[in-house]
Structures are given as structure tokens and as C-alpha cells.
């Protein structure tokens, strides 16, 4: 908890709305190394507001790295250069005095800029609505211990389920592919007995909606895994591929 | 056939075709590689090898057609993927950080693939056309002569050697990527696959490139 | 005065809920689609309610101010969820969970509600497992449990430190399924700014589209609020940046009683404030207190680094004052004592932290063993503070965390405004004056999955409410008042930012209406809040326009409500002349300095009615304890 403030040159993306042309605004900001990058933006905004200027629009909520709301690219890295760290957990002590930071929104055709650093990630919800669940009505569940689940599979399932839906994988991918996001959900259920009845329908439905929503295809660069704040593994993508091919090529049911 | 077009039009279906055709092409490369290595056993051995192939010409033709189809599928799909991905990503970041989150081999597949395509056209229009339809020189071992004559021309050899560099780049990613696409990823064997892929890519690139190099350096 | 009827069914406590379910009126399955239900909020309570009501066949409209339902702050809950499964064979039971919760709540909760909560807790676990929530498992494949928050049985189910996330994603999945099936329509990026009451019944809401700034009228036969707690009134809290009290407060202004706002939980083991720019506080699991020792210097104003303060000059104040429980005293006791030593000038980090020291644990079990137990928390601490807790003692400080108070509801979870139901942290609910660890998730899901689907049906079948016309005068009036508020905020054009005023309010509240309260302090706070309110409406600066995405305007509206709500919070604390749970009045303590409950006079729910800005009227719902004997908590 030091008092040695640093001064950074910030180049922040400003864009009034989705149709407007964006540009970078420049700010010189003195900041405590103990602040998070979002707290630094708060300070920039406070100054702007006090001067009667329009503050920078950016989103955040829990500021604990779990809700997935925050998301901006710092020097080309979604969530900034620190591995396995969400934007809100990125502290300024990771930067050097005098450094220049380019702060931009997540960039992808599927994530249209709404304003400044806020993008529209509703494509993710559409994919989830297509099949990211098990079809159990409330009240119809058997006793929780009725079906034992191996610890290995439960842990692997949770590894995948830790995805916070922030979209960093799409933003990092040179193809704006959502494969890591989709495969994380598909894998969570593929690894559990509760997910089996709809396993092959689910993967087909989710991939279909993914393709419809302007996400690109995976070319196995693994940039998604490198930038994912939760370190979701690309082995989930492999698992989804297996399930998808099996669904399309081997399953009895013909209609997708 | 709706399920089929459904599959081949999906992003995963396209990937599957990419990996499948790519794998077949990688297998073909091994066969081609072994054939080329015959050159190092001397003109007679190489002549014998080509003549043996000539005896099963109809079969070779069928295989060639299948190979051509595989290539076309691979390239066609590659272009479709490239186009889909182009549309999915309208803007780049002010600072390019891709070097820090992915390797150059995986990011440059479209570029290396395009160069290989150009090389392929060049290769077919020269060696393949000459072997099959051209006038063969009046020497004892005409096929060997064709090869050695071409490769003694520096610009020709250099095109080959450089192209093989691109091929190596392409294969280094292609090999392990195909396994990932087929869903074969496991912490037990994925690191090994990646190593084998690199070894395969290096052997292919160096091996193929060694021949023009050999002749360029004055090999008989 | 509002007449508060708790509508608790007759009969033995163990049979109330089952008998009541049987006696309820049902809506014919074919008729369910004729009923529109609005659900505001998509956290655990809201998402589970919307999904389940959709499954039953009602037409549900779900609203969230987030871009996606999955962002709700339930997602940040770390510890776990309680259930009386007794899988560990350690003599747990529905009755024991009921007993622990009533006692833990310091006898200020409604017995019948708590019993029902304990009863349905088991169904929740079944439901979540069926949804594919990957709970922690034993090697044999059965569910793992741990003991949590000082409970004497292991009844807490968990998924690493991300239980809230996994449960919310389960409910989000069920909600998505209903959206896909067309039973639920989701309205994201909409903030509820008013409740519409027609002929005394809740019939709709006014929302602001946060992207366009347009107001929208939505009509329905019933409105369900699941909009979370109000702890952001303190400015710095563990709540998410957007968590707010506006939906609850606006409903309160339309007639819904606000109950027990003074019951606030301040969590002892949070990361300390780093400076002026601090935007929120981060919680660390209180399990750290199992092996960490809390201390400060014996001398006030001691600026020596911790390794230069010899053992003899350290005050392990919890161990000194509570030899039996030591560092494991309940949350409120630990928090309050941290405040006291800091008030004495013995705190570190500028008087805003105390040490949590693992040196003794390193010696006793070794650094590796400590790492095994708390490695992720140590990493988190180091990531946020930049200090290595293996070398230097951690610093911790209490932070506002959870609101036990909320809108008053009866046994049906319906407020005193018919047709307005309130779930989860937004209601005053089942936790009494203090919430136990791992009980918040349980309550949110119990309300949403297993209570509201029954009780709302009973309301709809009994009252047969008509759908109100969105063109009616009530809707137009409500919409106009929302628009007028926006105009007014934008027109002030003063000098202070919204955040600056919110910070001032937070400082007043945490100082005088926080962990320890006095009559004098509360009276001062009320005056200061009133002044601040005046200051706000004269001097706040809200930039931008109303017809666009304007985050400053969003915050301004919320802070305007806090400036009213904060006063009610102080008033309720002033009214309650006793100490119980999260509410501690210095005048009411035992000679040993412990909370002194006054059951004869204060065993009631304080429900406040809105009578204009700064004006409230108190109604009381007496609490009867027929099953559990009133007793005093002791940790000596």
C-alpha cells in the first residue's frame, strides 16, 4: 500500500454510438499503484464530470472478477496484459510510470460498440438460450445424491463452468470465434450425467446459433485460452468438436 | 442431403473438412517425400521408381483425381473460413498483442496456405506437366535429368526452397491443429502431438528443400 | 398505520407449509397463460422465480438493468449454500437448521418463514444438481459438505469459492430455457423506476431503457421484486457497483412498507481501503479467522511496521476479550471490535485496518499447510494489495455486506400492497437481525423456486386481478413522475459530482449508522443526511442527456433515493432501543460490553410507511416464539 503515484498517458476509445466514428481521446492521469484500472477510469470520469464533460462510458459491476461485466482491451489484450485477470482486478502497479496505455472496447463484429468502451454481447445470451441448460422443471429432480458423479468429472465440469461470459475469448481471437465460450458450456454438461439426455441436441443447437451471430470459426490459435481471465482450457473446444461430429455423423436422430 | 450441407456449412463442419482433407494431404506428402528421396539413391533408382508408377498409370490417375479433389476441397473450405472470419472481425486493436497470446504459425495459415497454393500451381505446371506430358530428354535416366536440369537454375531452386519454408510453417500448425479439431486433445498426449508435428514439419520442409539445394550446390 | 397481517397459517410449525399448500387455491393450467407476471431482477431469487413461473405456464416478463441476466450480484457469493440434507450423518435436520437460523438471527425473524426455508432447503440442492451445477464431490461421487460460519454441523454445499456463480448460472440456464420456449420475455438494460398501483393493487412498472433513455410502461397482474439489498447506501460495500435500492424504495414510496432497515451486516474480513479512489470493497472468506490471529498495537498512533512491534506490545484483542471463541466470534462482534480499536487510534493503514496474522499458524502447521488451506485467498490478497501475506501480516477491515432488512412481506412473500411480491435480499425475510453464512443463497432460491410459484398462484386464483390498461391515468402519472425526476436531475447543474455526494453520505452512515450506533450519533446522522439531501438537489451536477445511455444519470437517481433511504435507516436504528444482531446500540450493552436485546419491548418487526420525503410512520408486527425459547447469545 504505497503512496508512490505514477503518471500514465491514456489513449481511450471514444465513440458516441454504434453508428458514430470512433477516435482516441488522450488523458494524462496520475494514479495510485493500488488502484485498479477501473478505479483509474472512475477518477478520469470524476474529473470530466466536474468539468461538465461527458464521462467515458464503460461497464463494470462486481469488481471481483466474477460477473463478467467489465471488459476492455488494454494495449491489445482483452482484460489487459496480466494473465488470468479480469479488468477489474488489474491493478496499476503492473504498469510503469510514464507508460502509454491504449484502452479500447472488445472488438468483434458480433460485439457492436454501444458507446465508448461498452459493447453489445447479447449474442452470448442467444447462444445460451439455444441450449445451455438441462431441461428439468423445478420440482422434478431426484435426490441430489441419487446419481454419484466422479470427482474428476465434477471438477472438470466446474473448470468449464467457471466461464464468466465476458467475451475476452472472442475479443482475443483473430477470427472473433466464440468457440471457447460455447465449448465451456457444452463441456460442463457433457461431463455430467444430468447433461446426457440432451447432450447431442445441445451441441448442435448452440453451434447453430453461434454461427448465426457473426462469430468466426476456430483456427486453433489458442489466443482465447491465453487471454481468458478464468483460464478456461481449449481442451473444451476439442470436447465440443467430438460431440458435434458425433452428433452430426453418428447419432440416430437425423434432424439437427 | 440436408444434414450433410447443414454440417458442411457449419463452422465446425468446415473445420472438420479442413482437418480431414489436411490430414489426407499430410499423408500424401509422406508418400511424395519417400518418392523424392529416391533421388538420393541415384538416377537409376529414381528412374526405376517413376517407371514402376508408370506401370500402374490408371491407378495413379485415379489417385491424382482424388488428390485434386482433396486439394480443391481444402482450398475452397479454407477460403470460405477465411471469408467467414473476415466478416467476424471488423477492427483491430491499436496495439497488436497477438504475438503475446498465440504463435505465428497458427496466425498465418491463410498466408502460408496461399503461398503454398501458388507454389502448387507452379509445381504442377512445371514438374508434373513435364513428367506427364512434356518431352523427355534423350538421356539414360530422363526423369532424373529433368529434375537436375530444373534445379540447377537458381531462381527455380530458390522458389522451391522458400516455398518449402512456408510449407513447414503451415504443417507445424496443421499437424497438431488437425488433432485438436478432431477432438483429440488430452494432457497425456497433446504435448507429444505438438512435438511430433514440429518434427514432421521440419523433416518435410528440410527434406523437400534439400533436393533443390543439393542440385544447386552442384550435386550430380 | 398499516395493518400488518403476517398470514402465517395455523397449525404445528412442522405442518404449516404442507397444510397451507393444500389449502391454497389453484389456477387452472389452461388459464395460467392468461396471467402476466412481471419479475424485476434476475439474480438467484429473480431468475429462479421467472424460470419456475414460466415452467408453470404463466406469461412472465423479466427485467434486468444488466446486459445479461447472468451478471446479477448473486454471482459473487463465495462460500456456499446450506441445506438440511444430513448427508454427513452428523445429526443435522430441518429442525436444527430452523433452530440455528432463528437463533443466529438473534430472534428477530418470523418462525414460520424460517421453518419453511429450512424445509425446502433440501429441494434446492436436488434442483441445482439436476440443473448440472457442479458442486464439490467426494471421491465416492457423493456431494461434499463443509462446516461454515461456526455451524456445528457440515451442511454447506459448495463449488470451490464460486458457489454463487454456479447457482446463478443454473437458474440462468432454466430462465434461458423458458425464454427459448417463449414463456418468459427478457428485457435487459431496463431499470425499474416506479411501481404502478391501480385500485390499491400492484399492476405494473415503469422502466427506463438504459440504452435509449426512453421510459416504458409494463402492465401485469402481479409484480415480483427481486432487486437485492441496499448496502451500497454506505458507498463502500461488498455489493456490486450497480446494486441499488431504487426499485425497493420506489415501491416503498407507492405504499409498500420497509421493514427493519437497521439490520445491516458488516463483514469483518474484507480487504482494507487503499485510498480515495477506492470504488468498492472485496470480501475474503471468513474461514481465514480459523488460523489467523487478529491484533493491533497496544499503543495508539504506532507507526512501526508490524515486524518491529514485539509480541509484548501487541494486543490480540479478540482473544483477550473472548477467551472461549477468540478470533472465531460471530461477524458482528468481530467487526465491532475492529471499529473500536481503530477508533482508539490503534488501527493500521491510516486507522482503517487491523492485522490478521498467520505467523503462529506458519510455526504450528507450516507454510505449506497454510497454503493448502488458503492459497487462493493469499493469492487474491497479494494480487489486490501487492503485499505478500506470507511475509507481512494481512490487513483487514469490516465492510458493509448484506441487508437483512427490506420490504415487508407476509408468509406469502407478498408486501402490504396486494399483488406486489418481494423475494431474496430485497425482502426483510428470514434472517432476522443477523444472517448466518451460506444462508443468503438458500433463501434467494427457496423464495424463487419453491415459495413464490405456490403463493402467487393463490393470489391470482383468489383475487382474479384484471390486467390494467397501460394507457390508464395511473400508468401515465407514474411515467410522468419518472420523466420529471430525470428532467429535474439534469437541470440542477451544480458543482458536485454524484459520486462526491454519495461518498459523503457513505461516510456519515458508516461512522454513525454502521457497526456501532448511539442515540446522539443517530440524531446527528439524520440531520446530516437531510442537509446532504438538500445539498444534492441544489448542487449536484449530472452531465449528458436523458435520451441516451447516461451512466451518471443512472447513478444520480440511485443516490437521490439513498439520500432518503439513509435517513430511514438511521431512524429505524434510533427507534430500536436495543442491540441485536447487526444492530448494536452502545447504550444497550451488558456490563461485559455485549449486545443487550430487549425482548419485552422490541420483539417486533419495524415496518415503515412512507409519508413524504423524510417522513415515515412506524407499524409493528409482533414476533412470537412458540417453538424456540428466547435466549441470549454468548461468546465469552
Image (spheres, coloured by chain):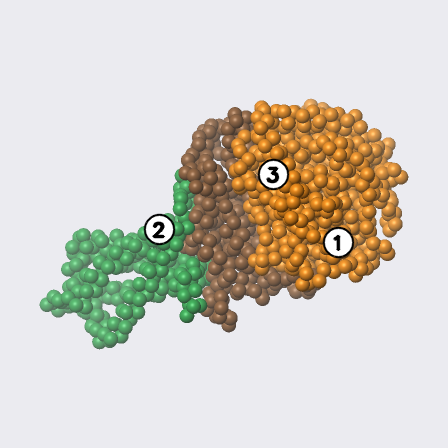
Chain colours: A brown, B green, C orange
- Residue occupying the far right of the picture: C600
In the picture, residue B84 is in which quadrant? bottom left
Label 2, secondary structure: give it: loop
**Dot 1, how many residues are within 10 Å of its Cα: few (below 14), some (14-19), or many (20+)?**
few
**Quadrant holding the C terminus of chain C:** top right
- Residue shown at the point (65%, 32%) measured from the top left: C560
**Dot 2, how many residues are within 10 Å of its Cα: few (below 14), some (14-19), or many (20+)?**
some
- Residue occupying the far left of the picture: B138
Mark nearer the viewer, 3 or 2: 3
Residue C113 visible in image = yes
Q: Nearer the viewer, residue C69 or A19?
A: A19
Instruction: Kindly identify which numbered label has been placed on residue C463.
Output: 1
Instruction: Kindly identify which numbered label has been placed on residue B108.
Output: 2
- Residue shown at the point (52%, 25%) measured from the top left: A51
Question: Relative to B108, is C599 above or below?
Answer: above
Cα–Cα span, label 3 and label 2:
42 Å
Q: Nearer the viewer, residue A180 or C529?
A: C529
- Residue shown at the point (87%, 45%) measured from the top left: C630
Label 3, secondary structure: give it: loop
- Residue shown at the point (84%, 45%) measured from the top left: C623
How far across and down, in percent of the image, does residue B73 sit? Answer: 33, 63
Cα–Cα span, label 3 and label 1:
39 Å
Instruction: Kindly identify which numbered label has been placed on residue C241.
Output: 3
Residue C343 visible in image = no
How far across and down, in percent of the image, does residue B11 sit? Answer: 43, 59
- For disc 1, the chain is C
Check if mark 3's residue and mark 2's residue have beta carbons within 8 Å.
no
Amino acid at each position: 500500500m504505497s503512496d508512490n503515484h505514477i503518471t500514465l498517458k491514456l489513449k481511450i476509445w471514444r465513440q458516441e454510438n454504434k453508428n458514430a466514428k470512433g477516435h482516441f481521446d488522450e488523458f494524462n492521469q496520475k494514479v495510485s499503484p493500488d488502484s485498479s484500472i477501473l478505479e483509474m477510469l472512475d477518477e478520469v470520469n470524476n474529473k470530466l464530470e466536474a468539468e461538465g464533460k461527458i464521462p467515458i462510458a464503460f461497464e463494470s459491476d462486481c469488481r471481483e472478477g466474477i460477473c463478467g461485466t467489465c471488459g476492455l482491451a488494454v494495449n491489445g489484450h482483452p482484460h489487459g496484459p496480466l494473465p488470468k485477470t479480469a479488468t477489474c482486478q488489474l491493478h496499476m502497479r503492473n504498469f510503469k510510470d510514464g507508460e502509454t496505455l491504449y484502452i479500447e472496447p472488445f472488438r468483434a463484429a458480433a460485439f457492436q460498440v454501444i458507446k465508448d468502451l461498452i459493447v453489445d454481447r447479447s449474442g452470448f445470451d442467444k447462444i445460451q438460450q439455444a441450449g445451455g441448460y438441462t431441461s428439468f422443471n423445478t420440482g422434478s429432480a431426484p435426490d441430489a445424491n441419487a446419481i454419484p458423479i466422479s470427482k474428476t468429472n465434477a471438477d472438470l465440469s466446474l473448470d468449464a463452468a467457471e466461464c464468466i461470459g465476458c467475451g475476452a475469448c472472442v475479443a482475443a481471437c483473430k477470427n472473433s470465434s466464440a468457440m471457447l465460450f460455447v465449448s465451456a458450456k457444452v463441456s460442463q454438461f457433457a461431463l455430467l450425467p444430468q447433461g446426457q439426455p440432451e447432450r447431442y441436441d445441445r451441441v448442435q443447437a448452440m453451434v447453430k446459433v453461434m454461427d448465426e451471430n457473426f462469430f468466426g470459426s476456430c483456427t486453433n490459435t489458442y489466443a482465447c485460452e491465453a487471454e481468458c481471465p478464468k483460464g478456461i482450457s481449449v481442451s473444451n473446444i476439442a470436447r465440443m468438436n467430438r460431440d458435434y461430429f458425433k452428433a452430426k455423423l453418428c447419432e440416430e436422430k437425423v434432424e439437427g | 442431403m440436408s444434414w450433410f450441407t447443414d454440417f458442411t456449412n457449419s463452422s465446425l463442419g468446415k473445420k472438420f473438412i479442413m482437418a480431414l482433407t489436411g490430414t489426407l494431404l499430410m499423408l500424401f506428402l509422406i508418400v511424395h517425400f519417400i518418392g523424392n528421396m529416391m533421388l538420393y539413391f541415384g538416377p537409376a533408382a529414381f528412374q526405376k521408381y517413376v517407371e514402376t508408377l508408370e506401370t500402374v498409370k490408371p491407378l495413379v490417375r485415379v489417385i491424382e483425381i482424388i488428390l485434386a479433389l482433396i486439394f480443391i476441397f481444402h482450398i475452397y473450405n479454407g477460403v470460405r473460413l477465411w471469408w467467414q472470419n473476415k466478416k467476424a472481425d471488423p477492427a483491430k486493436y491499436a496495439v497488436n498483442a497477438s504475438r503475446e497470446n498465440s504463435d505465428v504459425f497458427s496466425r498465418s495459415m491463410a498466408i502460408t496456405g496461399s503461398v503454398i497454393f501458388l507454389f502448387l500451381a507452379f509445381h504442377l505446371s512445371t514438374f508434373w506437366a513435364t513428367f506427364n506430358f512434356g518431352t523427355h530428354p534423350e538421356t539414360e535416366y530422363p526423369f532424373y535429368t529433368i529434375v537436375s536440369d530444373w534445379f540447377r537454375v537458381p531462381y527455380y531452386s530458390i522458389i522451391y526452397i522458400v516455398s518449402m519454408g512456408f510449407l513447414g510453417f503451415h504443417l507445424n500448425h496443421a499437424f497438431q491443429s488437425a488433432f485438436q479439431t478432431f477432438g483429440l486433445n488430452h494432457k497425456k498426449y497433446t504435448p507429444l502431438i505438438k512435438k511430433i508435428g514440429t518434427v514432421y514439419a521440419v523433416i518435410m520442409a528440410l527434406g523437400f528443400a534439400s533436393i533443390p539445394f543439393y542440385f544447386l550446390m552442384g550435386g550430380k | 398505520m398499516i395493518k400488518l397481517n403476517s398470514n402465517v397459517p395455523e397449525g404445528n410449525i412442522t405442518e404449516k407449509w404442507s397444510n397451507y399448500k393444500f389449502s391454497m387455491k389453484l389456477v387452472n393450467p389452461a388459464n395460467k397463460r392468461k396471467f402476466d407476471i412481471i419479475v424485476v431482477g434476475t439474480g438467484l431469487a429473480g431468475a429462479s422465480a421467472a424460470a419456475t413461473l414460466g415452467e408453470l405456464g404463466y406469461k412472465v416478463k423479466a427485467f434486468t438493468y444488466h446486459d445479461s441476466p447472468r451478471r446479477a450480484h448473486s454471482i459473487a457469493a463465495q462460500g456456499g449454500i446450506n441445506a438440511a440434507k444430513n448427508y454427513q450423518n452428523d445429526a443435522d435436520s430441518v429442525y436444527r437448521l430452523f433452530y440455528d437460523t432463528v437463533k443466529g438471527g438473534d430472534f428477530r425473524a418470523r418462525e414460520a418463514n424460517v421453518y419453511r426455508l429450512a424445509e425446502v432447503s433440501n429441494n434446492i440442492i436436488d434442483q441445482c444438481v439436476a440443473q448440472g451445477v457442479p458442486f464439490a464431490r467426494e471421491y465416492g461421487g457423493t456431494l461434499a459438505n463443509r462446516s461454515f460460519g461456526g455451524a456445528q454441523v457440515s451442511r454447506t454445499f459448495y463449488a470451490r469459492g464460486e458457489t454463487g456463480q454456479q447457482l446463478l448460472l443454473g437458474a440462468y440456464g432454466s430462465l434461458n430455457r423458458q425464454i427459448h420456449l417463449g414463456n418468459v420475455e427478457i428485457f435487459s438494460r431496463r431499470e425499474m423506476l416506479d411501481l404502478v398501483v391501480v385500485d390499491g393493487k400492484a399492476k405494473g412498472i415503469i422502466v427506463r431503457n438504459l440504452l435509449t433513455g426512453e421510459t416504458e410502461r409494463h402492465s401485469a397482474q402481479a409484480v415480483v421484486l427481486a432487486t437485492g439489498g441496499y448496502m451500497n447506501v454506505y458507498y463502500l460495500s461488498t455489493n456490486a457497483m450497480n446494486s441499488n435500492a431504487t426499485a425497493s424504495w420506489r415501491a416503498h414510496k407507492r405504499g409498500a412498507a420497509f421493514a427493519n432497515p437497521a439490520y445491516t451486516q458488516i463483514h469483518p474480513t474484507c480487504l482494507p481501503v487503499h485510498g480515495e479512489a477506492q470504488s468498492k470493497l472485496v470480501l475474503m472468506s471468513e474461514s481465514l479467522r480459523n488460523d489467523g490471529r487478529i491484533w493491533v498495537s497496544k499503543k495508539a498512533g504506532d507507526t512501526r511496521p508490524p515486524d518491529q512491534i514485539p509480541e509484548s506490545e501487541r494486543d490480540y484483542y479478540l482473544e483477550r476479550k473472548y477467551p472461549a471463541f477468540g478470533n472465531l466470534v460471530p461477524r458482528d462482534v468481530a467487526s465491532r471490535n475492529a471499529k473500536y480499536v481503530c477508533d482508539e487510534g490503534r488501527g493500521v493503514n491510516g486507522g482503517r485496518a487491523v492485522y490478521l496474522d498467520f505467523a503462529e499458524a506458519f510455526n504450528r502447521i507450516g507454510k505449506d499447510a497454510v497454503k493448502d488451506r488458503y492459497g487462493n485467498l493469499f493469492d487474491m490478497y497479494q494480487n489486490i494489495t501487492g503485499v505478500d501475506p506470507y511475509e507481512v501480516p494481512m490487513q483487514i477491515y469490516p465492510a458493509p455486506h448484506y441487508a437483512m432488512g427490506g420490504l415487508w412481506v407476509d408468509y406469502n412473500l407478498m408486501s402490504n400492497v396486494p399483488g406486489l411480491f418481494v423475494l431474496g435480499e430485497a425482502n426483510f425475510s428470514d434472517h432476522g437481525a443477523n444472517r448466518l453464512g451460506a444462508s443468503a443463497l438458500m433463501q434467494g432460491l427457496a423464495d424463487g423456486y419453491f415459495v413464490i410459484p405456490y403463493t402467487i398462484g393463490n393470489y391470482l386464483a383468489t383475487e382474479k386481478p384484471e390486467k390494467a390498461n397501460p394507457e390508464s391515468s395511473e400508468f401515465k402519472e407514474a411515467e410522468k413522475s419518472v420523466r420529471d425526476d430525470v428532467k429535474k436531475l439534469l437541470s440542477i447543474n451544480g458543482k458536485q459530482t454524484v459520486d462526491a455526494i454519495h461518498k459523503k453520505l457513505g461516510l456519515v452512515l458508516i461512522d454513525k449508522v454502521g457497526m456501532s450506533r448511539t442515540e446522539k450519533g443517530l440524531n446527528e446522522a439524520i440531520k446530516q443526511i437531510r442537509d446532504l439531501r438538500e445539498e444534492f438537489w441544489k448542487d449536484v451536477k449530472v452531465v449528458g442527456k436523458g435520451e441516451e445511455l447516461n451512466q451518471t444519470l443512472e447513478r444520480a437517481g440511485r443516490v437521490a433515493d439513498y439520500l432518503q433511504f439513509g435517513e430511514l435507516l438511521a431512524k429505524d436504528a434510533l427507534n430500536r432501543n436495543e442491540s441485536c444482531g447487526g444492530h448494536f446500540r452502545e447504550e444497550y450493552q451488558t456490563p461485559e460490553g455485549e449486545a443487550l436485546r430487549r425482548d419485552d419491548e422490541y420483539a417486533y418487526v419495524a415496518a415503515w410507511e412512507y409519508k413524504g420525503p423524510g417522513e415515515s410512520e412506524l407499524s409493528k408486527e409482533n414476533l412470537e416464539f412458540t417453538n424456540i425459547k428466547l435466549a441470549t447469545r454468548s461468546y465469552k
